Image: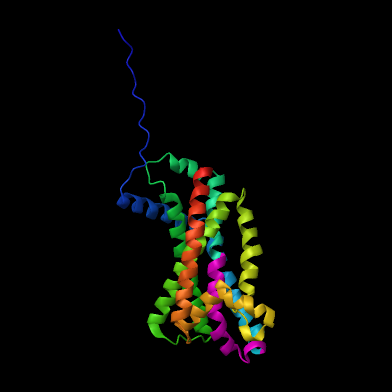
Amino acid sequence: MTAATIPAPLAPTRRVSPVAGVRHTVTLAWRSLVQIKHNPMELLDLSIQPVMFVLLFTYVFGTAIAGSSGEYLTFMLPGIMVQNALFATMTTGFGLNNDLTKGVFDRLRALPIARWAPLAGRILADTVKQAWSIALLLGVGSILGFRVGNGLLGVVGAFALLLAFTLAASWISVLVGVLVSEPDKVQIFGFTVIFPLTFTSNIFVPTDQMPSWLQRWVEVNPVTVVADALRGLLVSGPVAGPVLQTLLWGFGIAVIFAPLAVRALRRRV
């Protein structure tokens, strides 16, 4: 009598259809969004800080810089939206690193899902949070007196452009989140790189009010380009040139950092 043999369990296949991969991505994105119920501070970070910036700069520096708080709000709000969006990209790297260090990615690899779904789900969830933050800033700005000059089309264009640019910029955060050993180091990167990058742009002060040596950098700073594009879409001013430059910056960032981030993630997991 021969002993019965137990067949070995089949390894989960990685070949899933694109439709199934999209479904997996949406499911994992929803997982990230649902976590806000248990950690509301994550959403408050995207809500309280930008509103505080708007209030403080409008009423503390507005009269000194632009002559009135209302005029300064019109100039500054599109720039604040850009600054907040760039800082918010750091949550992508922070959450990704948290999943990696806690072994979440290892558990997901054991499931029959698309290999790219965990990363895509994280980015999709953070894009939704970005949209919430942009809408919140526009709402608060409207209460304070900000008025859109180009109607609904300008608002939709500004939303789409800023989300597209920050989606590309999030690959930098992904790369940092994969390379560093602790989530807190992602935040350190944000404050040491993004903070000076945004404050040496024309977000808060017009370029012509800066020293001549600094103006050269401000004019080529990608943050300045995106801020000018949003001002053109939401208020008035040139649109085609700044929008095209923003798209080119976003494309260049994605082309450079997306492959590096994906390669680093494959090596780590």
Dominant SS type (magenta):
helix
Q: What is the magenta range?
A: 64-87
Report if residue 221 lies within the magenta region: no
Q: Where is residue 29 in the image (x, y as percent from the top left)?
A: 42, 55
Q: Is residue 130 left or right of residue 24?
A: right
The image's colour scheme reads: rainbow
* Furthest residue in direction bottom, as rendered: 67
Residue 128 % position (x, y): 44, 64
Seen at 47% across and 60% down, the residue is 255
Where is 215 relative to 115, above or below? below
Q: In this view, does 61 lie to the left or right of 104?
A: right
Residue 90 shows in the view: yes
Residue 72 covered by magenta stretch = yes
Residue displayed at 47% across by 41% down: 107
Q: In which image quadrant can residue 215 be found? A: bottom right
Front residue of 24/120: it is 120
Q: In which quarter of the image is the N terminus?
A: top left
Q: Relative to 265, does residue 256 appear above or below in the rendering?
A: below
Residue at the (41%, 56%) spot, across then down: 30
Q: Residue at x 51, y 61 (%)?
A: 170
Q: In this picture, is 56 found above or below 23? A: below
